[in-house]
Image (tube, helix red, strand yellow):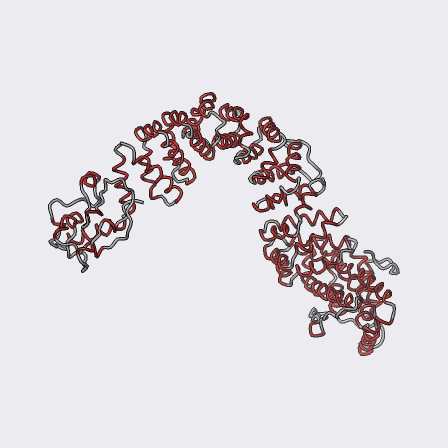
Amino acid sequence: MSPVESVPIAVLGRVDDYVELLYDDIPEKIKGSALILQLARNPDNLIELARNEALLSALSRVLREEWKRSIELSTNIVYTFFCFSTYIEFHSVIIQYKIGSLCMDVIDYELKRYDQWKEKVEGKKQVFLPDNKNELPKSRIPEPKRRPKSGTWAVADVNIQKTRSVVSSYHEELCNASDEFLSKNDEEQMKRKLKTLSKRQEQLLRVAFYMLLNIADNVKVEEKMHKKDVVGLLIGAMERHSNIDLLILIVSFLQKLSIFVENKNAMASKSIIEKLAPLLNSPNADLINVTLKLLFNLTFDTKLRNKMVKVNLLPKFVQFTSDDKHINLAMKILYHLSLDDRVKFMFTQSDCVKLLTDMLLLNVNSEVNCESGPGTTDVLLALCVNLAWCDRAAQQMAAEGRLRELLARAFRHRNAMLMKLVRNLSHHVQIKPLFVEFVGDIADAVTSGNASEEFVIECLGTLSNILTVNNNIDIYAVVERYNLIACILKLLDGANQCDAELVLEAVVAAGALAADERSATALAARAGGALVAALRQRQADDEHVLQTVFAFRQLLSHPRAANHLVSSTEAPAYLIDLMQDKNAEIRKMCDSCLDIISQMQNDWAARIKVERFRCHNGQWLSVVETLGAEGNTGGGAGAGDAPDDLPPYLSAEYLTTHRLATTSSDSQISLNDDSDSFSGEVDFNRANSRSTQDGQSDELLGLSDSGISGKTSEDEFQFTKGIHLFA
């Protein structure tokens, strides 16, 4: 925008004369504001103008009182304050005179007035326009008293009132036009007037939004804008697709606001995604770029990501990956969309996955970056890593020789991220046969010792995936040729202080190697103790504990390896200790291991039964101990006074030689029976209604009849069915 052509060149020394014009009629006010605007557009004059309180007071007063009567006058004054807003040193001037709040009110009114004009021209129902009750309050800023150039104060006031009553404009002509007028006269002429007014209004909106954008650098000011619904004003002005510059400004403003969750939520409530979608079809590259920036900020919200997919923006983002100007932002948006498993599958419905993989093969470790800046290849690689978790996408990535190319580039550049992509591909059963020819290269990378820890971690994870459930590979031959057990021992050794993730991958690899009987035997003999030692050091890490117990489970599935693990290591003791771990998966895996050990002919079987009894009946045992202690301290003549009292916990020796008998012979159950579980619920009342023929059981419990009261019959006593001995 430029000043009115008829206005002469402004001179800083005559600024007082220009201020006098602001007290005259509308034409003089427009002229005076245009001259002041000329001065404000020169940065050298801003300091002098900022010191002129009379000037700033007059401008703020005229804007507050006359902005409805002339768009040109409002534009000149707002533009003047915009010049101040370009420098942070003058933001205090705008805040002092509350120009920001006033501009938001002006924008709100102008948007509603435009809707009224448009509805009238199109012959639709008139939109409600704010009445006088909602008018802006008059300025409370004190103004300097200035005597008119001629006449008295009363005459001047009368002249002002006459001027206000006479002034008319396109606004009044359109607002006062009746439906009958529009139907009888030339509607084309009214449309031309609407177009003219729309252009003038867009100039005002643009300069007002720009000023608000500048002063929004202050967080407190931005909070006030949020309370006055600046997001709603910006989204309401987005319908003017004809003005590209205004759209770029609006989207840029929204992008800045979107970093705060309150503004982001406000945008979501006003269907921001649906309004941004048409802008991606614009021929203007700058508008597309700033729109992608805003969409990228919004992709951090899961619901908004789903909305983008719902309005079918995914193909559009894929299309932008072939444009150097937008590829970086498009890749970042696609990466965020790929976080959702449902969206991963949608990538496979076109050639997108193949295109991205080929693009990755061409640019991986490339020194030449596109115009969008560095980091595009890294984002592309991260996107492919996410997509590799999808079965169908993984198949498309590995097809047509792409897996060989990915592995070749990963080993050539020792790229850990590219190897992570390969590792994700190796998770899928359909792709595992394609890795058979590369097992030697991957195993050699693990044991050679000339690669970084990050690269070795990914290679070791890939090797573990390949060796799992793959009948086409002789695991023992791979172990012997590449000396994998020695490598695992080295990684498990605490003295080497290897990275925790690398140690975890070594344990996972041990579990994978233990699937083969010969490998399991060699692993138990050489690395069983190392696994236990690593478990002792990292027992606080649930993932490490779970993978170690799984490795034990794999070793126990082979007789020779199981015998060595049980007899030569402390693995059974640790498994017993982990029976009561808080992690359900660890407890489940421990129970599986202990089931196998308890069936073996060794000394651990009896101990496992005792510990399981304690684990599953801990509450009952604590009650027994408490009541027994109370009986002893109270001097009661119960079974607890006998000289052969049992210790608080039943010993393994006693459990292997005695029975807890029931009244019926067909329900007698011994602790030495093969059954691992008892069903039923504890019934202490029944337990204490036994007669003298069950005195042996009472003596076993160390209780007298006075310990727990009960009055049920003898035949109802079913003691052993009331205790959960085993899981």
Q: Is residue 28 left or right of residue 218?
A: right
What percent of the width, then of the height, locates residue 177? 82, 72
Q: Nearer the viewer, residue 270 or 184?
A: 184
Quadrant location of the N terminus in the rendered image: bottom right
Residue at 39% from the left image edge and 24% from the top image edge? 522
Side (left or right) of 365 relative to 77: left
Is 449 rendered above or below residue 278?
above
- In terms of image quadrants, where is residue 190? bottom right
Q: Position of residue 146 (x, y in %)?
A: 78, 71
Total numbered badges shown on the rendered structure: 0
Question: Which residue is depicted at the point 41% across and 39% down?
Answer: 541
Residue at 83% in and 76% down: 162
Among the 4 quarters of the image, the one containing residue 385: top right
| Residue 431 image position (x, y, % from top left) | 55, 33
In percent of width and height, residue 220 lies at 61, 58
> Vertically, is 235 above or below 466?
below
